[in-house]
Structures are given as C-alpha cells and as structure tokens.
Image: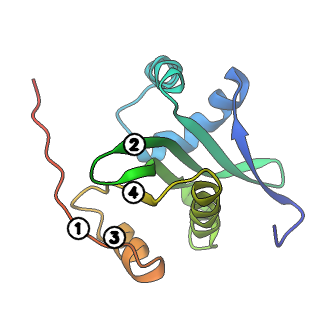
Amino acid sequence: MENSAEQIVELKTMEQWKEAFPVMNQLRTDLVETSYLDLLHEMVKDGYRLFALVKDDMIVALAGISIRVNFYNKRHVFVYDLVTDASHRSHGYGGKLLNFIHHWASENGAKYVALESGIQRTDAHRFYEKKFEYDKWCFSFRKTF
C-alpha cells in the first residue's frame, strides 16, 4: 500500500463483522445489526468474503465478494457490496479496494469481475465506467414475492 497506515484485510471474526456494520449500513440501509449478522453467517457458508480497507485502525471502505461460475461470466468474482464510509469518500479508498479486488480475482483464476449497481446510482456508474472501464452489458431483473 502507498501509505503504511493503510491495509486491506479480510474480515473473518464476529468482532470484525460488527465493527464493519456501520459502514456496510451506509450501503445496505435496510439492515439492522442482527439481520446483517444472520445474513452474513449464511453468505459466508456460500463463499462470500468481506474485505476492508483500514486506515489508522479504522475501516474506511468495504467490499463483499465471492467467486462464482456460470455460463455467461465463466469463472468470475462477483462484487456484492462496495462502500466507502461517508466521511472518507473522494479520497480514493473505493478505487484502491476495487483495484485490490481486480488483482485478487486474477490471482484466483477469475475471467471477469462483475457487479450490479442500482439504477439510481449514477455517480457509482460513472466511477465504474469512466474510471475503471467496466462495460454496462445487461439488465438485471427480480420479482418480489
């Protein structure tokens, strides 16, 4: 890392997950800590991994990812969550974490990094498309029951 006070670490313990919740909650605003922890336990069993960019012993950005395989993306890393703490935005932390994910994906045999972003998140789209040259290539649909 450029700054020795910055590091990217995988969060694996309950204590670390609880510490990450206030940042994750800025993206996943419908969650309360108990539902976050319940879902996280289930997601980890399915291969989900949570990484944090830590600066001066404080989590400033998070990325939740997993390796997936399907017919259209082959072996790929899917980014479920990417969020920078509101008080630390526009300092390049999200970009550093995304670059880490790209490198990690390549090291783990992934052919792509894929993600979804809410239709209304135009700033995020600009970040992915302009700064990181992601292609917008499909629509994602879901049906609520």
- The residue located at (45%, 51%) in the rendering is 76
* Label whose residue precedes the other's in the sequence (4 or 3): 4
- The residue located at (64%, 29%) in the rendering is 17
Task: Out of 26 and 102, give the one closest to the viewer.
Answer: 102
- The residue located at (46%, 59%) in the rendering is 111
Residue 57: x %, y % from top left: 82, 48
Q: Secondary structure at mark 4?
A: strand
- Tag shown at residue 137: 1
* Label whose residue precedes the other's in the sequence (4 or 2): 2
Gap between marks 2 and 3, in whole Å?
24 Å
Three-letter code for the amino acid on which mark 1 is drawn: Trp
Residue 124: x %, y % from top left: 38, 67
Q: Is residue 14 above or below residue 93?
A: above
Three-letter code for the amino acid on which mark 3 is drawn: His
**Residue beneath disc 2:** 69
**Residue beneath disc 3:** 125
- Tell me whether the residue at label 4 lies in contact with that at label 2, contact meaning CB atoms closer than 8 angstroms: no
Q: Secondary structure at mark 3?
A: helix
The residue mark sitting in front, 2 or 1, is 2
Gap between marks 4 and 2, in whole Å?
11 Å
